[in-house]
Amino acid sequence: MSDRRPSPFKTLFDNDVASLIQAADDVYQIRFKNRAANAYLVRGSKRTIMIDVGLSTNYPHLVACLGHIGVTPEMIDMVVLSHEHLDHIGAAYHFHGQAYIAAHRLAANKIMLRDDFSMLRKMFNEPNVPIDIDLWLEEGNLIDLGNFRLNVMYTPGHTSACITLFDQDKGLLFASDTLMPGGVMGGVFGSGSIADYIQSLERLKGLNAKILLSGHGRLSDTPLDDVRIALQRSHALLEDTAQLFDALDARSNFEPIMQSVRDLNKLDD
């Protein structure tokens, strides 16, 4: 006999490609079954937004899932991109001209300049189509949907440009790849930092979150447990990294680099 609790979340549609799951009233997760990140629809009384949109190849399935709750792409007022990775933002160009597209200013800069390395284009083999960012977000911005008020939190670590959206009244935590169910870490890429990751998780630990809506995997109604486990794992990773640097004897490697810099400076004398 299983002791696993039944899920409090309702699956409205499911096929081989994608699932549509109701997380709360007027809040839906679209979970793709390939490498694409989860997409979220929040249907407010004043405006409707999506948080991340997955890969461009998943766009028809995104539209099909939205259709099951009577939403068309034209009804989306804003698309908020959690960070610059293409598994989260690849389909965003489909919303050009019909919805405002928003991202943190650091992510916006990478996306607008088409920084393929930061966006992981080779990893996801996405078409090289420009994505325009209309709104550059910062820590402390508020996205007011009427019956939802989403606070923008700058939570770097996975990359330098990650944001989390939090509705304090409803306890909804849209944490993208900063926090996942079971405390799974989203990894540290390119511009990211384990130390920043830990600081961001500490901020999430202090919230009264009730539902975790992450970039990958299932919904979670135990976000406080999730962040506690993620903190333990990130501290362990930081310790492992320190031991690795000790093993590599960073000081002996640093001196030849500095000597090269000094030699270059002499050329200008």
Image: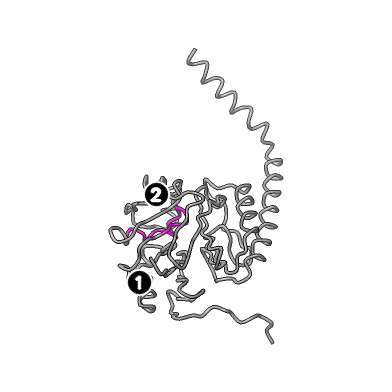
Residue at 69% x, 82% y is: 3
Q: Is residue 244 left or right of residue 144?
A: right
Lower sequence index among marks 2 and 1 = 1
Q: Residues within 10 Å of mark 2 (few under 14, many from 20)?
A: many
Q: Amino acid under label 2?
A: Ile
For mark 1, what is the residue? 63
Main SS category, magenta section: helix
Q: What is the magenta range? A: 80-94
Residue 242 x/y as whole percent = 69, 44
For mark 2, what is the residue? 111
Residue 53 x/y as whole percent = 41, 63
Residue 127 on the magenta segment: no
Looking at the rendering, in which quadrant would you find the N terminus? bottom right
Q: 123 or 185: nearer the eye? A: 185
Q: 47 or 114: nearer the eye? A: 47
Local secondary structure at mark 2 = helix
Residue most extreme to the bottom: 1
Residue 215 x/y as whole percent = 51, 63
